[in-house]
Image: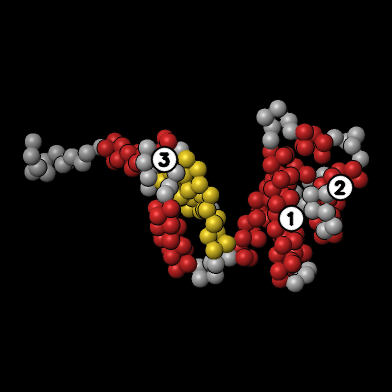
Amino acid sequence: MRDPNAWARALLMCDAGHGDAGHGDDDAEARATALEAAGEAIRDRRAGFSEAARFLDDPRVGSELKIESLSALVPGDETWAAFVTLVVRRRAAGLIPAVSAAYRRGLDERRGIERVRIEAARPLDEETRAAVLGAWTAYRRSADPRLSRITATESVDPGLLGGFRLEAGSIRYDASVSGRLRRLGKELAKPLDRPAAGSGGPA
């Protein structure tokens, strides 16, 4: 099974079938955090190949040691242990970063959570941040009443010159000065409409 979405769905189905609502939610969050930690380690190729990826791919390292190392990310969780056992034995560790992203999306959808990223030219003050998130929450809840919460992460990009950009899934809203300048430049680059010859327009 090489489809990361299928791995994520299988783990989410296990989450839904175990424990009371509160405890099960805590377990699911622990698994999401573990997947993100493992995925980040595998993605880190600044040295040409990350130590985590090398360890998981090395045929000289026994499967049991790999399983034990990954299982330790969520100690005592039998579902997680079974999951990483399958990952190791099917040599699917390279899929972990993509599985992590798919699992987090599925978990957020189940909880009614949407994550947004805000980039601004400078840190937003509390009033502006609240206004942006309030407007976005109202817009999204009108489209999806199941939405219960929006969480935001912020970063600063001075290249935006002013304003902000907001990303949520495949949606991108650009209210930055650099974005407005780019759109204006595209409009100015369009050829001017000219009247056809003999149309009676001005010469």
Report the amino acid beneath label 1. Arg
Closer to the camera: disc 3 or disc 1?
Answer: 3
Q: Is residue 24 above or below residue 61?
A: below
User: What's the mark number on residue 197?
Assistant: none
Q: Which of 158 and 111 is in front in this view?
A: 158
Q: Where is residue 65 in the image (x, y as percent from the top left)?
A: 90, 43
Q: Which residue is drawn at 75% across and 61% down?
A: 27
Q: Which residue is drawn at 51% across and 71% down?
A: 145
Which residue is at the far top? 47
Mark 2 or mark 1: which comes first in sequence? 1
Marks 3 and 1 sit apart, C-alpha to C-alpha, by 34 Å
Residue holding disc 1: 31
Q: Where is residue 1 in the image (x, y as percent from the top left)?
A: 77, 52
Q: Are marks 3 and 1 in contact (CB under 8 Å)?
A: no
Residue holding disc 3: 121
Q: Are marks 2 and 1 in contact (CB under 8 Å)?
A: no
Judged left or right of residue 82, residue 168 is left
Q: Which residue is drawn at 11% across and 44% down?
A: 199
Which structural element holds mark 3? Answer: loop
Estimate how packed mark 3 is, as few (under 14), some (14 to 19) or many (20 or more) residues with alpha carbons within 10 Å.
some
Residue holding disc 2: 67
